[in-house]
DNA sequence: TGTATCTATTTGTATAGACAAAAGCGGGGA
DNA sequence: TCCCCGCTTTTGTCTATACAAATAGATACA
């Protein structure tokens, strides 16, 4: 048994994505839907608010509700931790720490990160392999002021990306995807040719406007791609179970 | 004056993104929030439903509401039409049709698209330039059965991507991002070197399980990147105005 | 003609109350 | 011991009502 507001939501959504109600179309006012579905206005309002919350319609008092213009440009990409991704796909994942060094931020890197010069950081280089084949080179900077416990962590059993996700709250993330040609060092580590096209993911994560970590993950272009599906109705909400219990 | 349910939403959201309430934390039950905010349960319910709708909390009857685990992997990337993107950034955009040909689907391409062999298609190749410099090579397939009007459109004044977006409703899109090395033809058109790393965006668009269009857009790696920000609260909803009304 | 004001429409928010559905929990009986 | 049943908690849905806020359009007025 499906609820009424859900039913209204789905009916209207179908009309919108099918193109029967094109962008700019004025949808029936709440009172008309109340008549049509024989329910209270609150129920209709809930459905319409949900559509508005997902950006499928625009509502304006006294004016009405209108089908929004299409937003193909906003796509949800699954950008995951490498080890998680490999596990989900049923592949074997391993990694090796290539470098682990505590430094202070030089001026160039500080500018790039938007952080003050001289801050203490942990610099990590790490090589990931999937099914025994090198799959990614990870170059990471961790701000030790934000993650003091990283100072003593050796990342022997949990890869840095996963460790940080579990350890540190973040409030904002920025991703950049680039194509670069492999230099000699990258080519050697990734077992590819010099100049080969590589797909680089750069991620910077903040906690209330202070950088937590900055990472570049370089994949050989012939072994990796990013993919993302977009359905108008499924905007990035997944089912999850509560972890453990209360704390 | 901010509404009560909005205020509750923002308060709880702040507690979650700041890490004060970690993943798995059981948040107060509705009745407790009713007491705390001195409002009705419906108002609290609206705030909590909104948080659940955004995937920030998980709710289960009799059990309670829990902070969801973090979803850094779900990132909204702005993947736009090239001309729109250039305009937004204040750059000049031009394009040139390199090829325009009506064909029938061969078996290899049919399999790749998941469409029956022999279907009529329009094949388009197009070179985009931004500020006079080649910026992207577009290779597109349009299913003529889904977009009959493409048969007579010459795309002289509106680029194919934009034209299709305005013309055809779609219900699902899939994006893939790859890094590839430029072959001789690509290098010549994009005025780069053979073997240079290129960032390729592949997009396939469906209308109720039938392909509308398939396109590969190849960018020179040194002139292009994809970027996307993620804030827990801002999940891809932008303000828009109804079509036809000025403001 | 232009401007200020009023009015009607439509959405936004909030309330109190009611019952339903899911599910953990404990008790009683086999 | 194990299973079924009913109780309780918590969320889900729905109603009817009320008033607030925004604003397009009409009207009155200068």
Image (cartoon, coloured by chain):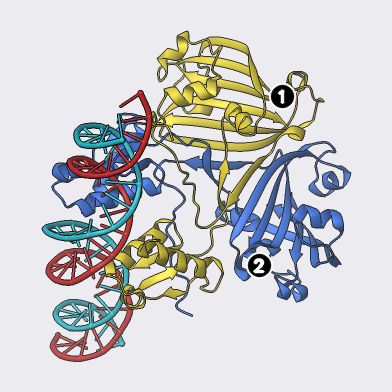
Chain colours: A blue, B yellow, C red, D cyan
Residue shown at 49% from the left, 80% from the top: A247
Q: Secondary structure at mark 1?
A: loop
Label 1 is found on which chain of the structure?
Answer: B
Residue B8 x %, y % = 40, 67
Q: Check if mark 1's residue and mark 2's residue have beta carbons within 8 Å.
A: no
Classify 10 Å Cα crowding around label 2: few (below 14), some (14-19), many (20 and above): some
Quadrant where the N terminus of chain B sits is bottom left
Classify 10 Å Cα crowding around label 1: few (below 14), some (14-19), many (20 and above): few
The front one of A222 and C9 is: C9
Residue shown at 78% from the left, 22% from the top: B191
Label 2 is found on which chain of the structure?
Answer: A
> Is residue B111 visible to the viewer in this orientation of the structure?
no
- Number of marks in the rendered image: 2
Where is B148 relative to D8, above or below? above
Lateral position of residue D20 relative to residue A148, left or right = left
C-alpha distance separating marks 1 and 2: 44 Å
Look at mark 2 in the image and give the residue it sits on: A163
Look at mark 1 in the image and give the residue it sits on: B131
Where is D21 relative to D23, above or below? below
Q: Quadrant of residue A204?
A: bottom right
The front one of A70 and B142 is: A70
- Tag in front: 1 or 2: 1
Residue D19 x %, y % = 22, 60
Where is C30 relative to B215, above or below? below
Quadrant where the C terminus of chain B sits is top left
Q: Secondary structure at mark 2?
A: helix
Q: Are marks 1 and 2 on the same chain?
A: no
Residue B210 x %, y % = 41, 28
Residue shown at 33% from the left, 72% from the top: B30
Label disc, if present, on residue A239 of the rendered structure: none
Q: Quadrant of residue B179?
A: top right
């Amino acid at each position: 048994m499906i609820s009424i507001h859900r039913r209204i939501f789905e009916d209207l959504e179908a009309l919108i994505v099918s193109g029967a109600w094109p962008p700019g179309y004025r949808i029936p006012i709440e009172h008309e839907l109340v008549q049509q579905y024989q329910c209270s206005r609150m129920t209709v309002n809930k459905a319409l608010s949900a559509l508005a919350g997902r950006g499928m319609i625009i509502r304006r008092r006294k004016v009405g509700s209108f089908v929004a213009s299409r937003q193909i440009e906003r796509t949800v990409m699954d950008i995951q931790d490498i080890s998680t991704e490999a596990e989900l796909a049923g592949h074997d994942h391993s990694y090796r720490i290539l470098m682990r060094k505590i430094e202070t931020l030089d001026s160039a890197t500080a500018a790039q990160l938007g952080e003050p010069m001289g801050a203490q950081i942990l610099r990590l280089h790490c090589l990931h392999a999937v099914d025994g084949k090198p799959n990614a080179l990870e170059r990471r900077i961790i701000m030790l002021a934000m993650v003091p416990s990283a100072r003593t962590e050796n990342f022997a059993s949990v890869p840095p990306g996963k460790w940080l996700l579990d350890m540190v709250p973040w409030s904002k993330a920025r991703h950049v995807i680039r194509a670069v040609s492999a230099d000699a060092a990258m080519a050697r580590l990734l077992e590819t040719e010099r100049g080969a096209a590589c797909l680089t993911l750069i991620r910077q994560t903040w906690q209330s406007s202070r950088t937590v970590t900055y990472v570049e993950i370089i994949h050989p272009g012939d072994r990796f791609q990013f993919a993302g599906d977009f359905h108008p109705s499924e905007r990035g909400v997944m089912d999850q179970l509560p972890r453990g219990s209360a704390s």
